[in-house]
Every structure is written in structure tokens, then in C-alpha cells.
Amino acid sequence: MSGCNDSDSGDDKGAGSTAPKKPASGAPAPASSGATDPAASVAPTGEQPLVAGWQTQSRAEHHFRYDVPAKAAQWKLLTQDTALSYTDESGKPIVVMTGAANYREGGCASSPNPKALGEAGKGQLATVGTTGGGKDGTLQDNARNWAGNWGFAAYGGADHKPKVEVSEAKPWKRGGLDGFTATAKVTVTNRPSACVPATAIVHSIAQKLPDGTMHGWVIYADQGVPNALTSAEIKKVMDTVRSTDG
């Protein structure tokens, strides 16, 4: 599963390559140990999910709100400031997300990824979260980079060099967002354990705020394994993504 892969940074290359390119991520948030107060609110008071019975997650810093299925469907909301990250050889985060949720966490019996911080690396079949905050590059570039970088980091990194193919960015206009989306298809080329899927899918949504900063929403999901999210299930989650400003 995705959290069981080793990951590393490599040099800065294009999003469609086997090493991540720096998106407009700004300074990474410090990765949490996962010990954030579990009683902390993960959704603003009065906010209701768009799908009845689902759970709402928000991250005001990145101006994203979205819904995921209920706890009974094995979805877990993390507290908003819990940071999930994969690091390079020096321990520096190369991808970071907050405002996150995990699907089927703990399904892998192997040891957690030593290069994963916070709640990353717990054997989940899918993870969703928000990122960004910088001004570098175009919005289209950032949509592609976020999809490609998370696919690279979560499914092997420089140690195992997954093959990552990133689509062109396409307009995404819904939920009060006027941005772009991109998709990365991941093929794991060196499976270090049976916990690692042969393939995975990553989707990103990027938006640009009036101050010029760019922010992303990302979902990465194992494919071809029992209980993997289907394309329809992923689309249903993506269709709930909206701006916190609306």
C-alpha cells in the first residue's frame, strides 16, 4: 500500500519524470507526530457535507473544503493541522499536506515507511489533503507537479523509482473554484513488499488566490488491490471539493 513505500527526493525534474519538480508549495508545515488533540474540530461549526452521511474536512490556510465517506466506510479525518509528509535522504520534506483524510488506514502489515512523517505511512489505501502556498510557476504547472510529485514520493521515490505519467492540466471550474486539475498514473517498477500495489492513481486540483499564491488539493490511491477506490468513488469525492470562501 502507498504508505509502505520508501520515498526520496531526487533532483528537480518535470512532473512527468521519476523525480519531483518543486511546485509553489511555500515553506512546508512541520510534520506532526499524529498526537494532535483528537478532540480538535476538523470541520467548521455549521458546515454540512454535500453528500448525506459523509464527513467534511477543511483547511482554511489553503482555502479548500471537501467531503469523504463516513467512518463506517473506513474513512478517517485527521485534525486540520496534522501534516503528512515524505522526506529526502537528509530528512527534509519533499511533499507535505494538511487538512487530510485516510481511507482504510493500517491495512499493511509491513513496517511504516521510515521516510514518512506524521500520519503518512500507515498502510492506507488512499490519502486526501491540501498543500501549497507559493507563487512559483503557472497554475497548470503546479497542478501537474502536485499530481506527479505525490505519485513519485508515495509510491517509491528515488529508492524504487516508480514510473509516473502525468496528464496535461485541464480547467476545473466548480464549487467556487476556478483552477486546473491533473492526473498522474503510477506504475511501481520495484515492489519492495507485497504491501505495495502495482499501480496507483493521483488527482490534483489547483487554485490561485487573489494574493497570487497557489494551493492544491490532492488524492492518491492504490489501484489493483482489494478494496481499492474505484474511479467513480474517487470522482464522487472530487466533486465535493469546494472553496472555503464560498
Image (spheres, rainbow, N blue to C red):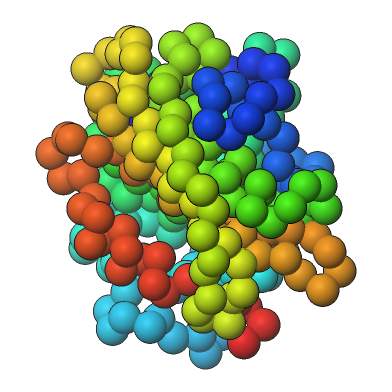
Residue 97 on image: x %, y %: 60, 47
Asked whether the viewer can see residue 112, the reply is no
Dividing the picture into quadrants, the one containing residue 29 is: top right
In the image, what residue occupies the spot 21% across and 53% down?
A: 230
Residues 87 and 111: in front is: 87
In the image, what residue occupies the spot 50% across and 28% down?
A: 152
Query: Relative to 66, does residue 14 appear above or below in the rendering?
Result: above
Query: Relative to 34, does residue 77 appear above or below in the rendering?
Result: below
In the image, what residue occupies the spot 40% across and 81% down?
A: 49
Query: Relative to 165, does residue 132 appear above or below in the rendering?
Result: below
Dividing the picture into quadrants, the one containing residue 44 is: bottom right
In the image, what residue occupies the spot 18% across and 35% down?
A: 224
Residue 163 on image: x %, y %: 41, 22
The reply, left or right, for residue 75 in relation to residue 241 is left
Dividing the picture into quadrants, the one containing residue 243 is: bottom right
User: Which quadrant holds the C terminus?
Assistant: bottom right
User: Which quadrant holds the N terminus?
Assistant: top left
Residue 43 on image: x %, y %: 53, 74
